[in-house]
């Protein structure tokens, strides 16, 4: 089991930046992949970015604006979000997947981008 706790969300104006963090209860280096998903208001959860053994996959809508990174020593995943747009508004979730098929989610952190 891995507990994931997100932080760093908030209210920001369009064009601004936020950095989300996801603290894990144990080593993230052993996980097959980690990533960020978001759920816009009234919509389904969607992929933002995943990182699997160093290979990243970004949603087209965030390419060039968002960057995923991790600090394995601190068991923390990050999402740097720049040039934010109102359509980036939503609840952002941290996700981890183990090599044997376990899937873990955080509780989510709200990001609101005002126009």
Image: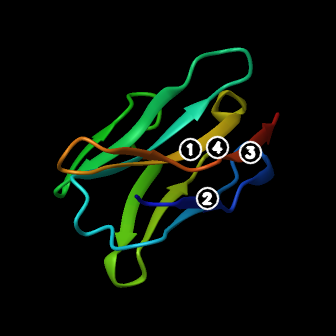
Distance from the alpha carbon under mark 2 to that under mark 1: 7 Å
Label 3 residue SS = strand
The residue sitting at 47% across, 49% down in the picture is 66
Q: Residues within 10 Å of mark 2 (few under 14, many from 20)?
A: many
Using a 10 Å C-alpha cutoff, classify the residue at mark 4 as few (fewer than 14 neighbours), some (14 to 19) or many (20 or more): many
- Mark 2–mark 1 contact, CB under 8 Å? yes
User: What whole-number distance in Å separates the C-alpha atoms at marks 4 and 1?
Assistant: 17 Å
The answer to the question of whether label 3 and label 2 lie on touching residues, with beta carbons closer than 8 A, is: no
- Picture coordinates of residue 39, whole percent (x, y): 62, 28
> Which of the two discs, 4 and 2, sits closer to the camera?
2
Q: Earlier in the sequence, mark 2 or mark 1?
A: 2
Say which residue label 4 marks. 84
Rendered image: mark on residue 6: 2
Looking at the image, is 66 positioned above or below residue 114? below
Q: Is residue 16 visible?
A: yes
Q: Which mark is residue 93?
A: 1
């Amino acid at each position: 089991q891995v507990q994931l706790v997100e932080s760093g969300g908030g209210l920001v104006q369009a064009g601004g930046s936020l950095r989300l963090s996801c603290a894990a209860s144990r080593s993230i280096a052993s996980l097959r992949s980690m990533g960020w998903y978001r759920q816009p208001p009234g919509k389904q959860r969607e992929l933002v970015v995943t990182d699997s053994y160093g290979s990243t996959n970004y949603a087209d809508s965030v390419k060039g604006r968002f960057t995923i990174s991790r600090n394995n020593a601190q068991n923390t995943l990050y999402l740097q979000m720049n040039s934010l747009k109102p359509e980036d508004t939503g609840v952002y979730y941290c996700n981890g997947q183990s090599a044997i098929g376990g899937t873990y989610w955080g509780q989510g952190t709200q990001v609101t981008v005002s126009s």
